[in-house]
Image (cartoon, rainbow, N blue to C red):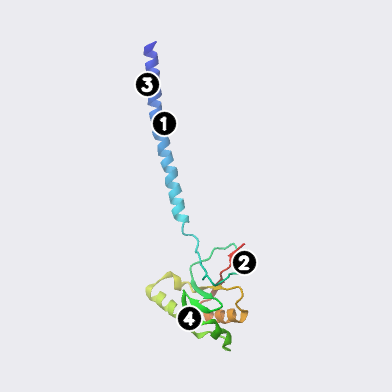
């Protein structure tokens, strides 16, 4: 009887060794797929952080923002890619339909992007990050300045509900 028990124990230990290595390999495959999935989907969204003095309106938009030139409008100034371009008081007081400093700033970004072959300026898209209390006539001037500079796609940054 002791001979039969020893064979059974050896058979069990041999089976355990095979199944354990197979389970470990399968587990490693799952982790590799998980890591690849996380790496691919890590950078899908573009996060726009509005300046601290800009309160965005709320909207039910489901599309994610794309990489673009950002124009931030606050009650103090207008910024292109974070750099102040013109004060808001000058924009409101102006009777011109176009804001020349904004047009020149984004044309400069576009020219630099074409020289570097950078993707940000090549898409000719502008995202306007505007405080919810910015007057519509100012938004209209910014949109006209952007389109005159060759940026045909204009998006507005909003808070999602």
- Depth check, front residue: 95 or 132: 132
How would you rate the neighbour count of disc 3 (Cα within 10 Å): few for under 14, some for 14-19, many for 20 or more? few
Q: Position of residue 132 (x, y in %)?
A: 61, 73
Q: Secondary structure at mark 3?
A: helix
Which residue position holds label 3?
10
Count of numbered marks: 4
| Mark 4 and mark 1: Cα distance apart in space | 67 Å
Q: Residue tagged by mark 1?
A: 19
**Rendered-image quadrant of the N terminus:** top left
Are circles 3 and 1 on residues that touch, CB within 8 Å? no
Q: Identify the residue at image location x=61%, y=69%.
A: 57
Q: In the drawing, what numbered circle is on residue 42?
A: none
Q: Rounded to the nearest whole Å, what is the CA distance between mark 4 and mark 2?
A: 26 Å
Residue under pointer 4: 85
- In this view, the residue in front, 26 or 93, is 93
Q: Alpha-carbon distance for marks 3 and 2?
A: 69 Å
Q: Which part of the image, by quadrant, shows the C terminus?
A: bottom right
* Mark 3 / mark 4, whichever is N-terminal: 3
Q: Which residue shows up at 40% across the image and 38% down it?
A: 25
Q: Earlier in the sequence, mark 1 or mark 2?
A: 1
* Front in this rendered view, residue 42 or 57: 57
Identify the element where label 1 is drawn.
helix
* Labels 1, 2: front one: 2
Confirm or deny contact between disc 4 and disc 2 (CB under 8 A).
no
> Could you classify mark 4 by the number of other residues whose Cα lies within 10 Å: few (under 14), some (14-19), or many (20 or more)?
some
- Tell me which numbered mark, 3 or 2, is placed earlier along the sequence: 3
Which of the 4 image quarters holds residue 83? bottom left
Q: CA distance from mark 1 to mark 2?
A: 55 Å
Of the numbered discs 3 and 1, the one sitting upstream in the chain is 3
Residue at the spot 42% in from the left edge and 43% down from the top edge: 29
Residue 120, position as x, y percentages in the image: 45, 71
């Amino acid at each position: 009887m002791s001979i039969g028990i020893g064979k059974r124990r050896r058979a069990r230990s041999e089976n355990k060794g095979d199944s354990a290595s197979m389970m470990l390999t399968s587990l490693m495959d799952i982790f590799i797929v998980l890591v690849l999935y996380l790496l691919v989907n890590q950078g899908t969204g573009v996060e726009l952080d509005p300046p601290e003095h800009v309160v965005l309106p709320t909207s039910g938009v489901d599309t994610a923002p794309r990489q673009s030139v950002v124009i931030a409008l606050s009650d103090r100034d207008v910024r292109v890619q974070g750099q102040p371009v013109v004060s808001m008081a000058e924009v409101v007081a102006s009777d011109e339909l176009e804001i020349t400093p904004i047009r020149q700033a984004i044309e400069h970004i576009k020219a630099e992007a074409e020289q570097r072959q950078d993707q940000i300026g090549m898409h000719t898209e502008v995202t306007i990050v505007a405080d919810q209390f910015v007057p519509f006539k100012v938004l209209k001037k910014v949109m006209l300045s952007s389109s005159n500079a060759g940026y045909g796609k204009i998006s507005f940054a909003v808070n999602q509900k």
